[in-house]
C-alpha cells in the first residue's frame, strides 16, 4: 500500500510539473466493468484518464474522450493520460482523446501529456494521449506536448508513453465529424494495445526506435483522417514517445 501511494504521488508530481492539473485522476474503468474500447465522454477543457491497477484489480484500462469549445480569452485546455503499475504482474493502460475548439480571438493554451510509471516485477504501464486543437482565430496560441515514462525499482517491467498533438490554426469552419472521431479513437486504442502487447512479449523491454516507429505510423494515419475530414491543413504536429529505462 505504501509503495502504491508513493509511486502514484510521484506521477502526480511529475505531471504537475508539466501541466496545470485539472481533475487529474478520474475514476478508472476496470476491464470487465466497462466494455473494452468504450470511452468515458466529457465536455471539459480538462480531460484526464488514469489506470492504476492493484493486487485486487491487476488489469485496469481507462479511456476518456472529450470535445469542448471556448470563446474566452486566456482559455486553457489540458489533456492528460496517466498509467502507473505498482503491483507484481499488473497491467495499466490509459488513453485520452481530446478535441478542443478555441473560437475566441484572444490568447489560448493547450497542454497534452502522457505519463507512465512502473515500480514492480513483471508489470506493464502504457499511457497514450492524443489532442486535437482547432484555433481558427486565437492569437497567440501556446501548445505544449510531453511524454514521460519512468521505472523505479523495477524487474522486467515495461513502461511506455506517447503524446500526440495536432494544431490547426485558421482554415475551414468544419468540425471533426463523429465518424472521424470514432476512427481516431480506434487507431489510438490500437496503438495503446500494440505498445502494451509489444511490452509484454519476450523478456526484453520495448526499445525506443520500435515504439517511435509505431507512434509515428499512428500519427500519420490520424493526420490523414483529420485533413480529409476538416479540410484544413495541420499547422503543427508534435509527437513525443518515451520508454522507461
Image (cartoon, rainbow, N blue to C red):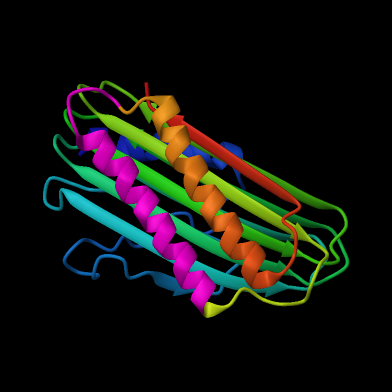
Residue 75 shown left or right of residue 28 in the figure: right
Q: Nearer the viewer, residue 130 or 20?
A: 130
> Residue 191, percent across and down?
39, 49
The residue segment tinted magenta is 179-205
> Residue 114, percent across and down?
48, 44
* Residue that lies at the very extreme toward the left in this rendered image: 56
Image quarter where the C terminus lies is top left
Identify whether 200 is placed above or below 151.
Answer: below
Q: Looking at the image, which residue is at 51% across and 37% down?
A: 147
Q: Looking at the image, which residue is at 19% across and 69% down?
A: 33
Q: Number of callouts in the render?
A: 0
Taken as a whole, is the magenta stretch helix, strand or loop? helix
Residue 221 shown left or right of residue 73 in the figure: left
Query: In the image, is residue 186 part of the stretch drawn in magenta?
Result: yes
Q: Nearer the viewer, residue 12 or 131?
A: 131
Residue 18 is at least partly visible in this image: yes
The part of the image, by quadrant, that contains residue 62 is bottom left
> Residue 149, percent across and down?
42, 32
Q: Looking at the image, which residue is at 32% across and 45% down?
A: 194
> Residue 36, percent across and down?
25, 65
Query: In the image, is residue 218 part of the stretch drawn in magenta?
Result: no
Image quarter where the N terminus lies is top left
Q: Nearer the viewer, residue 166 or 90?
A: 166
Residue 85 is at least partly visible in this image: no
Q: Looking at the image, which residue is at 18% across and 41% down?
A: 90
Amino acid at each position: 500500500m505504501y509503495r502504491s501511494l508513493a509511486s502514484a504521488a510521484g506521477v502526480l508530481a511529475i505531471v504537475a510539473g508539466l501541466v496545470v492539473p485539472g481533475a487529474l485522476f478520474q475514476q478508472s474503468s476496470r476491464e470487465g466493468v466497462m466494455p473494452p474500447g468504450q470511452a468515458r465522454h466529457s465536455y471539459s477543457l480538462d480531460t484526464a484518464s488514469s489506470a492504476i491497477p492493484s493486487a485486487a484489480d491487476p488489469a485496469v484500462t481507462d479511456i476518456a474522450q472529450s470535445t469542448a469549445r471556448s470563446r474566452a480569452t486566456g482559455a486553457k485546455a489540458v489533456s492528460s493520460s496517466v498509467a502507473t503499475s505498482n503491483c507484481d504482474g499488473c497491467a495499466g493502460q490509459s488513453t485520452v482523446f481530446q478535441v478542443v475548439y478555441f473560437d475566441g480571438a484572444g490568447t489560448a493554451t493547450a497542454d497534452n501529456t502522457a505519463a507512465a510509471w512502473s515500480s514492480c516485477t513483471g508489470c506493464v504501464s502504457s499511457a497514450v494521449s492524443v489532442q486535437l486543437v482547432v484555433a481558427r482565430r486565437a492569437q497567440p496560441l501556446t501548445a505544449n506536448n510531453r511524454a514521460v515514462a519512468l521505472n523505479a525499482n523495477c524487474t522486467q517491467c515495461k513502461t511506455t508513453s506517447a503524446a500526440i498533438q495536432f494544431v490547426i490554426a485558421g482554415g475551414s469552419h468544419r468540425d471533426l465529424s463523429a465518424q472521424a472521431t470514432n476512427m481516431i479513437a480506434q487507431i489510438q486504442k490500437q496503438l495503446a494495445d500494440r505498445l502494451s502487447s509489444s511490452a509484454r512479449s519476450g523478456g526484453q523491454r520495448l526499445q525506443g526506435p520500435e515504439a517511435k516507429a509505431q507512434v509515428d505510423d499512428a500519427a500519420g494515419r490520424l493526420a490523414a483522417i483529420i485533413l480529409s475530414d476538416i479540410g484544413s491543413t495541420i499547422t503543427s504536429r508534435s509527437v513525443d514517445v518515451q520508454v522507461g529505462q
